[in-house]
Amino acid sequence: MFPAAPIGGLMPLMAPVILILSGFIVSQPRISLVGWAIGQAALIGSLLSSTYKAFTGRVHPSMHEVGHDISDLFRFGFLRGGVFWGWPSSHTTIAFAMAGTIFMLFPKQRWLGWLAIVYAIYIGLGVSMTIHWFSDFAAGAILGSVIGTVVGRSFALQITSIARHLDNFSSNEAPSSPE
């Protein structure tokens, strides 16, 4: 579970870029739109979770002091606890936002959505065993799921619209006659 933090930090940066560029390279706008969708979900997840952290300032678990319960310590107020530590888990929020987006974008390929959710659970539980409390994971999962659902539905409408446009474009092309 320990590589969950670095994987959860790199995946939201790499996956959107890879999908956007792949879509352009193979001339598949749907692939690029999926990249833009998960990128938007990751960005919104990061911004919202960091905003919550700026106001809640929850103390993170100590890996060195065992037995001293500090799980209820919050430093409420603006930037009293920073934006990198605390409640909710940004790793979890972003992972669930991306997973929820994928789940919404691929209703006929549910296995892909479930695979993304398994990834998000791995990231969330992994960071809750190292740098976050379990309640940070739970809050991030809820917030990220809401973000993913909203972003996924929004982009699903765009992808459907583009698919119709491409279908109409290809059916309106008149076959060229050989001369």
Image: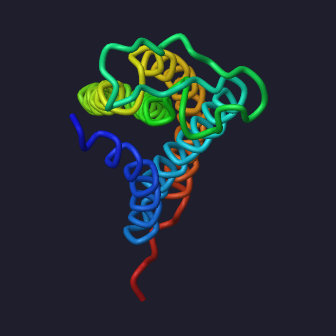
The C terminus is located in which quarter? bottom left
Side of 160 relative to 67 (left or right): right
The N terminus is located in which quarter? top left
Residue 62 higher or lower than 15, as above or below = above
In percent of the image, x 60 and y 26: which residue is there?
Answer: 150
Side of 16 relative to 46 (left or right): left
Where is residue 69 drawn, in percent x and y? 42, 12
* Rendered image coloring scheme: rainbow
- Residue situated in front as seen by the camera: 169 or 110: 110
Where is residue 54 drawn, in percent x and y? 70, 32
Where is residue 36 drawn, in percent x and y? 54, 50
In percent of the image, x 47 and y 32: which residue is there?
Answer: 101
Residue 67 higher or lower than 21, as above or below = above
Residue at the far right in the pictured view: 78
In percent of the image, x 39 and y 33: which residue is there?
Answer: 131
Q: How many marks?
A: 0
Where is residue 167 drawn, in percent x and y? 49, 49
Quadrant position of residue 100:
top left
In percent of the image, x 44 and y 33: which residue is there?
Answer: 105
Side of 79 relative to 129 (left or right): right
Quadrant position of residue 98:
top left
- Residue situated in front as seen by the camera: 74 or 136: 74
